[in-house]
Image (cartoon, rainbow, N blue to C red):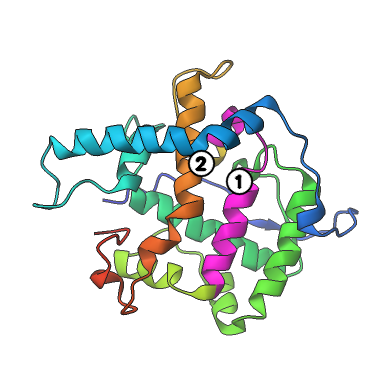
């Protein structure tokens, strides 16, 4: 059940200019920290360990759908807690990403900048400005779909609508850019604010487990999320790894 926990997020655009020169997004130099160096090099082992442990736990309990183990994304999101006290879930997370993508196309095609919102807290203005330029280029791939994103301000999407949305090639490219932007700075507290769920109860000092949880989420989104919306036949329901299977 979708509980609309992102309804109060400000997904609007600000219609004025910022005097920041356009740069190639790929040329932006992000200061390296021990956090990124350590987590990037060790993600594979952390992810494998975590998913292996989660799979073992899932195999000992009955799945919500008989005969099927719990989805990897569900296992990863269960490590995070929303402000309601419930665990984060796939449906609401998908809607959250859809609304960000729609917002960015809205800002790109209406020639506006991204306002200062919780979703983009801690992200430099230069990065956001270049993100808008990237979304302008993406819109050329499918201008009708891009315009549909601009006009879609809904807070709720059905499972079928979510599947269809992420099956579009243009959206898959947009998704990759969104994940790059959301994880571009190494600040766990900013992650908690952006995604609207927490890895622990601490705000000033996060633990190694927190780093592992966020890197597992980032790794899944980069490597497996889009694959769960594809299948050889082109029908998501035929895909055993489908996001909503």
Question: Which secondary structure class fits the magenta region best?
Answer: helix
Q: Residue at x 91, y 54 (%)?
A: 19
Residue holding disc 1 = 182
Callout 1–callout 2 Cβ contact below 8 Å: yes
Q: Which mark identifies residue 91?
A: none
Question: Mark 1 vs mark 2: which is more N-terminal?
Answer: 1
Q: Nearer the viewer, residue 133 or 27?
A: 27
Residue 197: in magenta span: no
Residue 171: in magenta span: yes
Q: Residue at x 59, y 64 (%)?
A: 174
User: Residue 70, position in %: x, y?
Assistant: 22, 46
Mark 1, secondary structure of its residue: helix
* Quadrant that contains the C terminus: bottom left
Q: Callout 2: 10 Å neighbours few (<14), some, many (20+)? A: some
User: Residue 221, position in %: x, y?
Assistant: 47, 51
Q: Residue at x 37, y 66 (%)?
A: 229
Residue 19 seen in the current view: yes
Query: In this image, 95 relative to 33: left or right?
Result: left
Q: Callout 1: 10 Å neighbours few (<14), some, many (20+)? A: some
Mark 2, secondary structure of its residue: helix
Residue holding disc 2 = 195
User: Residue 235, position in %: x, y?
Assistant: 30, 76
Tally of numbered tags: 2
Q: What's the distance in space between the residues labelled 1 and 2, CA to CA?
A: 9 Å
Q: Which residues are magenta?
A: 170-192
User: Residue 61, position in %: x, y?
Assistant: 12, 37
Residue 197 seen in the current view: no
Give the quadrant of residue 88: top left
Q: Is residue 195 above or below residue 146?
A: above
Query: In this image, 97 relative to 23: left or right?
Result: left
């Amino acid at each position: 059940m979708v509980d609309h926990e992102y309804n109060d997020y400000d997904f609007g655009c600000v219609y004025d200019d910022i005097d920041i020169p356009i740069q190639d997004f790929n040329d932006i130099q992000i200061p390296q920290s021990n956090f990124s160096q350590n987590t990037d090099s060790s993600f594979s082992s952390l992810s494998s360990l975590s998913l292996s442990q989660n799979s073992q736990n899932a195999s000992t309990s009955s799945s919500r759908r008989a005969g099927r183990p719990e989805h990897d994304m569900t296992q990863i999101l269960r490590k995070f807690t929303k402000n309601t006290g419930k665990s984060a879930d796939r449906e609401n997370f998908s809607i959250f990403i859809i609304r960000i993508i729609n917002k960015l196309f809205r800002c790109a095609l209406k020639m506006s900048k991204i306002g200062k919102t919780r979703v983009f807290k801690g992200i430099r203005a230069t990065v956001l400005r270049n993100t808008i330029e990237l979304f302008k280029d993406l819109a050329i791939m499918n201008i009708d779909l891009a315009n549909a994103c601009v006009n879609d301000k809904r807070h709720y999407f059905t499972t079928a609508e979510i599947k269809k949305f992420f099956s579009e090639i243009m959206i898959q490219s947009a998704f990759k850019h969104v994940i790059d932007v959301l994880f571009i700075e190494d600040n766990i507290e900013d992650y908690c604010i952006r995604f609207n769920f927490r890895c622990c109860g601490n705000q000033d000092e996060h633990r190694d487990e927190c780093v592992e949880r966020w890197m597992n989420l980032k790794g899944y989104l980069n490597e497996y999320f889009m694959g769960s919306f594809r299948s050889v036949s082109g029908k998501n329901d035929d895909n055993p790894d489908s996001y909503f299977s």
